[in-house]
Image: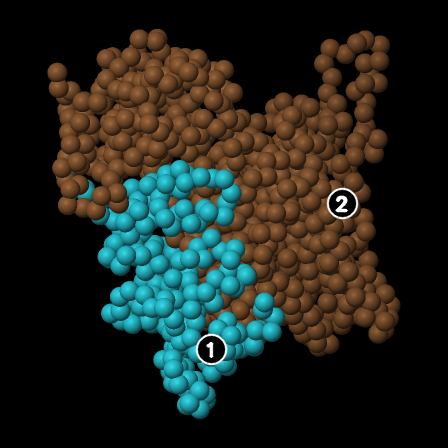
Chain colours: A cyan, B brown
Amino acid sequence: MGGFHSVPEDQRYRELADKTGFSLEQIGCLHNRFKQLSHNEDTLRRDDFSKIPDLACNPIQAEIIEAFFDKRNFQSHGVGTVEEIGFEEFLTIMAYFRPPSLNMSEEQREELRRIKLRFLFNMHDTDNDGTITLEEYRHVVEELLSRSGALGRETAKGIADAAMLEVASISMGHMEPDEFYEGITFEQFLKILKGIEIESRMHIRFLNVDTTVLCK
Amino acid sequence: MGGHWISLHFLTFVTLTSLLASGAKGEIPPRPINTAGPPITQNNGPQSFPEQTKTNLPLFTVDYSRIQIPFEITLWVLLASFAKIGFHVYNKITIWVPESCLLIGVGLIVGSIMHAVHEEPPAVLSSNVFFLYMLPPIVLDSGYFMPTRAFFENIGTVLWFAVVGTLWNSIGIGISLFTICQIEAFGVQDINLQENLLFAAIISAVDPVAVLTVFEDVNVNEQLYIVVFGECLFNDAVTVVLYNLFNHVAELPVVDAPDVFLGVARFFVVGLGGVLFGFLFGVVASFTTRFTGKVGEIEPLFIFMYSYLAYLVAEMFGISSITAIVTCALTMKYYVEENVSQRSCTTIRHVIKMMGSVSETLIFFFLGVVTITTEHEWNWGYISFTLLFAVVWRGLGVLVLTQIINPFRTIPFNLKDQFGLAYGGLRGAISFALVFTLPDNIGRKKLFITATIVIIIFTVFIQGISIRPLIELMNVRKTNRNLDTINVEVHSRTMEHTIAGIEDLCGQWSHHYWKDKFIKFNNSFIRKILIRDNRAESSIVALYKKLELQNAMEILDSVSADISNTPLDELLPDKKPSSNPKKKFLATDLRNMHDILSKNMYKIRQRTVAYTNKYAMPNDTRSKEILIRRHASIRRSLRPGSFQNQDVARSHKYLSLPAGQNLESQFPPKRMSHVGDGDTMSEMGYPAVRARFGRAQRPSSSSGMPLHMLDTVREAPSSVSLVDEQQPLRDSHSHRAPHLPGTRAPIPRTRNGSSGDNGDTARGPREEEEEEEEQQPLSPPPVWAPARQGEGRAQAPLLRPQWKPRPQPKP
């Protein structure tokens, strides 16, 4: 965060590379982008994110931005949100989107999968109570549909409810009549997304070439 | 040879094979240029019968020669189709032996029979017939059912392998064979370089139909699958271009530098020209279907005609017709499928599948027959080296090309994948047809035919049969493709948006970025022009609507069937219609109907999915858990008697399927859990289902049965379920106290506003949705209003799927 420029960049990059797994070139590119976004400040604020024109069209823009300020995503036991993030945090978030490497053991793959899914889960679980409640789920679906024109909240609600029921049926099996489905826990989240290869699909190709000049 | 003789034969012969043999007797001597033309005039067989009966009106005439060619073609197609039926009678065979092997096998048998009785195979496979009639269906089939999404995500690799790989193989094999030809011991010095290259181009056409089937069965990973698929599609194009090129060059006495340069330039003209033409025709086709709403019967025709037109025009200009038809299919597919009605959509798919399948079947079949019946020129040296080079260059090519492409791929191919790719290089129908249609002035045509047949048989039989055990043994990366839950859809969607967002954030563009841009462009411009109902829809909504609609159709269906077939009083709640034996009969009927329905529904697909089996329709029935929930509510109201069933708990898996017993007997679980074997579409971002379907259905609902009928039906639960649900409701109220209010409460009904009273709170979301759907295009008649107030407890409260209805209503 602070004092970023006091340390020689090279060494600093190397530390970050060890920490996040990015290559030095990639860190360089991302750092350029970071500076571009933050207007050469050391930290990024929410305002800086919401000014990105491409992001403005994203239906879940708010969630994405929020993920960058969510302590859970860059500290192991962090809770709550921060107001501004430094480059290291920025990079840590980006590291969630690194592609899996070619030679991975099954355990590593599983671990990577958990990490990535945890990130997604945290995006949904806004109040950090360990479950995605119906309310949170509905919110997500609404956001997803928010760019689709006049579809209305009713549809979103219907979908969220149906999805929730689906999870309940998959994960809870038999429920007693007086039982109540609390919401999707992380374990259940893992379970329902069992089939998709998150580890290989949730990734971005981080280029080694600087593209900041092309970006608005 | 005479018509009379044939006719007697025809009457006496019983078996199809002998029929064919006799039919072949009347074959036109050498080979017709165009077999599709009316054959009478060319036929020089004696036609003495009419002359003899000049004086009297003949009582019974037979004019076989007149119908000979279409008749024979029909019989051949029939025989090949029978063979296919035969294979599937014994399911186990097709698991271990690819269908193409079996077809060739049957062809071999038929060929031997014909050879034994000294028959000639029908000469339908001329160059013109092949290129104008047999190839287009095969290619259209592949192009139309290509998993678009996976294809575009891997387009670079696919093209790399298809174009560069095929070039690599052709040139590599060609030059190596030319070197071999210099060895005197083989006695093939007369084959020059051009002819070797031509031959190499022919046998480089990889046709991995059999492999795709295997890949599909073992759920091999998406990347590998699509590369093999795309390769088979586009290398057809490359091969045909090369074939024409070398064919032209092979006729030249001397080849100099300008020829080579022109050849290379032509290669690009041919390829890109094909893309352009295909795109053009695709857009026109999509645009046309905007206006075909009123002429539903001929709607599918436009698709075939435009595709074929694209093919023919491309052929006319000498550019790649295969590329043209594939691009055409790719371009129009989504727009057309959105424009045309459900029926037309189904028709289009079936016809394309059918024609493609028939073409391919025939070619394999002929391959078997021709293998036996043609004269072969056997040259050990040349043929074994051809085989060796084909295998070696393929392996080398994959190895080298993956090394080059891997750094550009996010998920690189590992060694196992590469093995799959290399080993999947079966040669097939295209190679055979190409070599068979070589011009006769190629000196060693017979040798080429023999060598090609050897390669095809070797690859199809040995590699085709062994690839499944090998893939399973090696444990190549797998993909799970049967994920049809709403949750998966929602979360994948979120993930994609997140990725796109992060890409925007870090200024890195990849296909997500371009996909995003394209979808935006598509939604704002293209769809407005090409699509009748141009409302942009999120795919989640599309999925949801589709489920809704499907359900609605089923309900309407069953309801109308019930209503039309049962006396009215049976529908009343206090009867037990299930005790009626007549119902049993109905149930099977219904099941059939629903099977048909669920197959024919136009379905959305998730991205993980969706490959098409070359030989099977993409028949995707999706998980219907949620639907069943709503279904149950309606169904239950139809059959309130079953409510008192004790078996309710058994069905708890299906959420609120309290009418378990009855529903299960009517719609056996088989249908619900049926997993489709794949659809090609992965249509994220291509909104799929529109209210149009609903509209199409609705008239039938309103005209087919009086609305008050439905009303009865909907009202019905009030008598039963009010009591039934009181208990769980109370439970939920008392239980809810410690929880956060709001988050877990059953959904309050907002639709009816103030009129939604307490009873309405218990209504499931599905119910709401249904009403919403019904309200959109068809404003509900006032009859419905009173019914709604009191009813509505039929639905399970949300998130309490396991409530049990009381066995008996309390007095």
Please give the count of numbered marks on the rendered protein: 2
Q: Which residue is mark 1?
A: A41
The percent coordinates of residue B145 (x first, y second) are 56, 46
The residue shown at (66%, 38%) is B303
* Residue B565 sits in quarter: top left
Question: What's the residue type where badge 2 is placed?
Answer: Leu
The residue shown at (84%, 69%) is B259
Q: Tell me whether circle 1 and circle 2 mark residues in contact (CB < 8 Å).
A: no
Q: Secondary structure at mark 1?
A: loop
The percent coordinates of residue B19 (x first, y second) are 62, 31
The residue shown at (15%, 32%) is B730
Image vertical order of residue B149 relative to residue B721, above or below? below
Image vertical order of residue B697 relative to residue A168, above or below? above
Q: As rendered, which of B363 and B785 lies closer to the eye?
A: B785
The percent coordinates of residue B541 (x first, y second) are 45, 42
Q: Chain of mark 1?
A: A
Q: Chain of mark 2?
A: B
Q: Which residue is mark 2?
A: B312
Q: As rendered, which of B94 and B30 lies closer to the eye?
A: B94
Q: Is residue A111 visible?
A: yes
In this image, B447 relative to B389: left or right? right
The residue shown at (14%, 35%) is B731
- Label 2, residues with CA under 10 Å away: few <14, some 14-19, many ≥20: many
In this image, B576 relative to B190: left or right? left
